[in-house]
Image: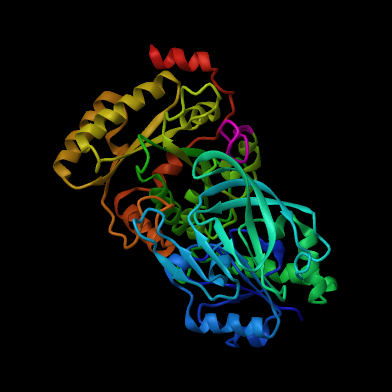
């Protein structure tokens, strides 16, 4: 019986993709399977998923030794994103640091990684078919998506895949970048092309043929389903936090949007905390991002142990994955009790761009999605935040967008919070009960935003702790409503509303 393992440790996004429904066995952080046996004694192949394992430094010496032994036995090893980084020589994780912050890998692949942000769907070219994974596929195009911060790859090994990207580091910059490297033997492949196995059955077939497991694929997929269901039950990784979901779910899940008054308002942090807190109550919440920066979804997907679906990114202009009207249709019947939409930057950033839709507010209007306004008070002070919030609400009202609640994030003085909350309630008409204050979280190595040095296990634990302390999360389900696509405002209509 063919056994294909998937390595899970702190920071791993184990179910972020299906990997062709190939994984049959979970490899724990100590390098053993659930039966207690060592991975190299049991497995025919090993998959190392993406996540923040490099930043989390969660690869144990025992697991590292098992990976080396699998390679020594000529077993197949497939590393995705962070898994690729672990197989390489080193990663510079200091994107916003004045000096490099180097994390060493296993060195099974002679590659190093430097910061380069890219998050979008891509088409890629297989340029080498001398590996087990790409046998007979030279000059074949494959497709998937990128979701990485350290995407500049320097290789002295066998370059196998190149992706054709349109944007990097938030700018339009079409280029061809290296995205897949193998060792000389061809049994180890690392790639940054998420979905390579899910979207390209020819690569899966090569793996199955090499393992002499083509006839076992139905059985492998059945065992993969059992593994998936078991992993999905736990909230986060290595928490032992098991919370059964409600048995019944609405056919059309209601939506609510976290909309910020600016960047770094705390939307991503709060979203992951809300998802986890609701999950503990049996409520299944899926988070969707406005725009292409799907890295912001990783914390919520880590907590919820879920796949990043095509509908997880709402397209604005020509960036992102899926148009809103299709997203609304595609989330139907998926077992969600609530869809939480995370806005991009400020609510109105991009509003006056002629390429409509180009802002969070336009998406909220088009889907008739109610809003929770989020503002960090740590920059200009809570008094300034209150005025900023009210100005945003006034504009949203003119756009026929309902603001149903306000979160004052990173507060510190309860008396001032009370005065500010009264001001917002009086000016906006929002119930005082729907204006919440979030105290400043204490999270080690949290990072200001997901592109910074981030450890998913600490980030999400801190988020859940503060949300459970300060937010009545059931309110989000109560305030949400079923979306209805009503089309986008024209550029001329937006300008009139903005100016008048």
> Can you give x and y, in whole percent of width and height, for residue 445 in the image?
34, 61
Q: Percent from the top left, x then y, of residue 480? A: 47, 38
Q: Quadrant of the C terminus?
A: top left
Query: Magenta span has 351?
Result: no
> What residue is drawn where x is 42% and y is 34%?
371
The secondary structure that dominates the magenta segment is: loop
Tell whether 3 sits left or right of 464. Answer: right
Residue 366 is situated, as x and y percent measured from the top left of the image, at 54, 27
Q: What is the basis of the colouring in this image?
A: rainbow
Query: Height in image: 462 above or below 286?
Result: below
Residue 34 appears in view? no
Q: Residue furthest front?
A: 156
Query: Nearest the camera: 200 or 334?
Result: 200
First to last magenta residue range: 314-325
Q: Nearer the viewer, residue 136 or 243?
A: 136
| Residue 128 seen | yes
Residue lying at 42% horizontally and 67% vertically, measured from the top left: 102
284 in relation to 400, above or below: below
């Amino acid at each position: 019986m063919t056994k294909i393992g998937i390595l899970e440790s702190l920071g791993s996004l184990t179910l972020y993709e299906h990997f062709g429904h190939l994984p049959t066995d979970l490899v724990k952080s100590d390098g053993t399977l659930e039966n207690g046996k060592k991975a190299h004694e049991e497995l025919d192949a090993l998959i190392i998923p993406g996540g923040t394992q490099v930043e989390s430094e969660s690869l144990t010496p025992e697991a590292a030794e098992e990976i080396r032994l699998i390679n020594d036995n000529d077993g197949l090893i497939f590393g995705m994103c962070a898994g690729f980084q672990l197989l390489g020589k080193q990663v510079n994780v200091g994107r916003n640091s004045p000096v490099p912050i180097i994390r060493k890998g296993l060195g099974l692949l002679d590659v190093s990684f430097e910061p380069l942000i890219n998050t979008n769907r891509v088409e890629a070219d297989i340029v080498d078919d001398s590996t087990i994974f790409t046998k007979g596929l030279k000059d074949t195009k494959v497709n998937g998506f990128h979701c990485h911060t350290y995407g500049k790859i320097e290789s002295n090994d066998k370059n196998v895949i190149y992706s054709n990207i349109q944007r990097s580091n938030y700018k339009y910059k079409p280029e061809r970048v290296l995205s897949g490297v193998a060792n000389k033997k061809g049994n180890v492949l690392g790639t940054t092309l998420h979905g390579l196995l899910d979207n390209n059955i020819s690569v899966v077939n090569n793996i199955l043929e090499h393992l002499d497991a083509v006839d076992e694929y139905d059985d492998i997929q059945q065992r993969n389903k059992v593994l998936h269901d078991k992993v999905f039950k736990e909230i986060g990784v290595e928490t032992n936090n098991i919370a059964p979901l409600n048995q019944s779910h609405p056919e059309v899940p209601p939506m609510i949007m976290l909309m910020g008054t600016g960047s770094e308002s705390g939307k991503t942090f709060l979203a992951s905390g809300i998802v986890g807190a609701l999950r503990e109550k049996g409520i299944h919440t899926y988070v969707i991002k406005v725009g292409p920066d799907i890295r912001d979804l990783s914390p919520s997907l880590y907590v919820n142990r879920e796949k990043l679906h095509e509908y997880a990114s709402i397209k604005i202009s020509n960036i992102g994955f899926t148009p809103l009207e299709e997203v609304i249709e595609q989330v139907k019947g998926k077992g969600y009790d609530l869809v939480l939409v995370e806005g991009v930057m400020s609510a109105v950033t991009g509003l006056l761009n002629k390429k409509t839709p180009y802002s969070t507010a336009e998406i909220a209007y088009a889907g008739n999605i109610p809003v929770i306004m989020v503002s960090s008070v740590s920059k200009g002070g809570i008094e300034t935040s209150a005025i900023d919030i009210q100005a945003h609400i006034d504009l949203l009202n003119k756009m026929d967008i309902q603001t149903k609640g306000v979160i004052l994030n990173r507060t510190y003085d309860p008396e001032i919070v009370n005065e500010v909350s009264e001001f917002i309630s009086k000016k906006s008409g929002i119930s005082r009960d729907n204006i919440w204050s979030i105290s400043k979280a204490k999270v080690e190595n949290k990072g200001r935003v997901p592109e910074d040095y981030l450890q998913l296990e600490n980030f999400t634990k801190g988020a859940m702790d503060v949300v459970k302390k300060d937010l009545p999360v059931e309110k989000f389900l109560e305030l949400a409503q079923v979306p209805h696509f009503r089309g986008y405002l024209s550029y001329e209509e937006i300008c009139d509303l903005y100016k008048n």
